[in-house]
Image (cartoon, rainbow, N blue to C red):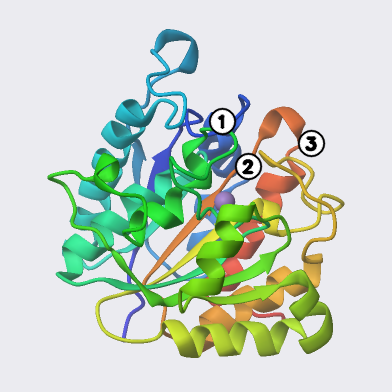
Amino acid sequence: MQAAPVAVIGANIDLGAGRRGVDMGPSAIRYAELEARVRRLGREYVDHGNVEAGVPEAEPVGDPKLRYLRQILGTCERIADAVDGAVGQGCMPLVLGGDHSVAIGTLGGLARAHGAPGGVLWLDAHGDLNTAQTTPSGNVHGMALAAAAGFAGKAFESEHWTFPAVEPSRIALVGTRDLDEGEREVLRRSDITVFTMTDVDRLGLEYAVRQSLEKIAGPGFVHVSVDMDALDPDVAPGVGTPVRGGLSYREAHLAMELVAESGLVGSLEVVEVNPILDEHNTTAKLAVELIASALGARIL
Ligand SMILES: [Mn+2]
């Protein structure tokens, strides 16, 4: 069977983050020759451009515990529509962030397209499991997974999706190393699977990702959401919120190679590339390499 064409959806938004810059992520990833790399794998490439997004200087903040939520949900609705459309056309959606709040739209659109909630592998230094009640910052990118899992309440409802878009028992976090107290509480009382960096150190990345893929497999859809801050800042310096002690270059590639090998995954997302903090577009180039590995690029 011919592999599905890759449908690129740019989400140039940084309203969900605490500092500017990740809105330029989609440009940086395209500039790092995403299209050529995807085509070299024999995959068709369809670029849907960027969805419309507001600029923080021009928008009212709104509720300080849910900063810019109204504008973020507007952009996420456009992402959800684009993702739903791409799935309907038999394509593999590839969403380029933007801050991680874009996943609210991606997961919402996937659940709508498939008519059911799915599973997600969440590669991230953070849990993104805060709510308006637990957030220390009010930044919505730290609530994206909570929202999609239906933990964050009515504020995240929309006519464009039905939450939960993911089953909590089919969420797996890998690379986690910076959690807020409210997020620890959620992880303790839910059946979310989590492999912290300590687990990765002790058990190995291959075990963590294989177990995670087994957990998230099932009906509806299986999605992979890659926050580039899952990687160590030594190899991925240009990210929204760098945290030391992350995945190595090879561990990140191995994760993507295992994703490709599983054949389970129907959609992909790469977020939080911040060109302002990057060094000669290193992080965006690495994002393109990881996308290629997830699409089945092999060394031999
Ligand atoms: Mn994140």
Mark 1 closeness class: few <14, some 14–19, many ≥20 residues within 10 Å: many
Residue wearing tag 3: 280
Mark 2 closeness class: few <14, some 14–19, many ≥20 residues within 10 Å: many
Residue wearing tag 1: 24
Mark 1 or mark 3, whichever is nearer to me: 1
Q: For the residues marked 2 and 1, what is the alpha-carbon distance in whole angstroms?
A: 8 Å
Do the residues bearing badges 3 and 2 touch, measured as CB atoms within 8 Å? no
User: Can I make out residue 291 in this image?
Assistant: no
- Farthest residue toward the top? 58
For label 3, the SS is loop
Instruction: Identify the amino acid type marked 1.
Output: Met
At x 50% / y 51%, what residue is drawn?
Answer: 35
Do the residues bearing badges 1 and 3 touch, measured as CB atoms within 8 Å? no
Instruction: Identify the amino acid type marked 3.
Output: His
Residue wearing tag 2: 273
Residue 133 x, y percent position in the rendering:
45, 42
Q: For the residues marked 3 and 2, what is the alpha-carbon distance in whole angstroms?
A: 12 Å
Mark 3 closeness class: few <14, some 14–19, many ≥20 residues within 10 Å: few
Choose top left, top right, bottom left or bottom right for residue 281: top right
Q: In terms of sequence position, does the residue under pointer 3 or pointer 2 come before the other?
A: 2
User: Can I make out residue 26 in this image?
Assistant: yes
The reply, left or right, for residue 9 in relation to residue 185 is left
At x 71% / y 55%, what residue is drawn?
Answer: 178
Do the residues bearing badges 2 and 1 touch, measured as CB atoms within 8 Å? yes
For label 1, the SS is helix
Mark 3 or mark 2, whichever is nearer to me: 2
Look at the picture and state if 50 lies above or below 219: above
Residue 21 x, y percent position in the rendering:
62, 27
Look at the picture and state if 78 lies above or below 212: above
Instruction: Identify the amino acid type marked 2.
Output: Val
Q: In terms of sequence position, does the residue under pointer 1 or pointer 3 come before the other?
A: 1
Look at the picture and state if 54 lies above or below 173: above
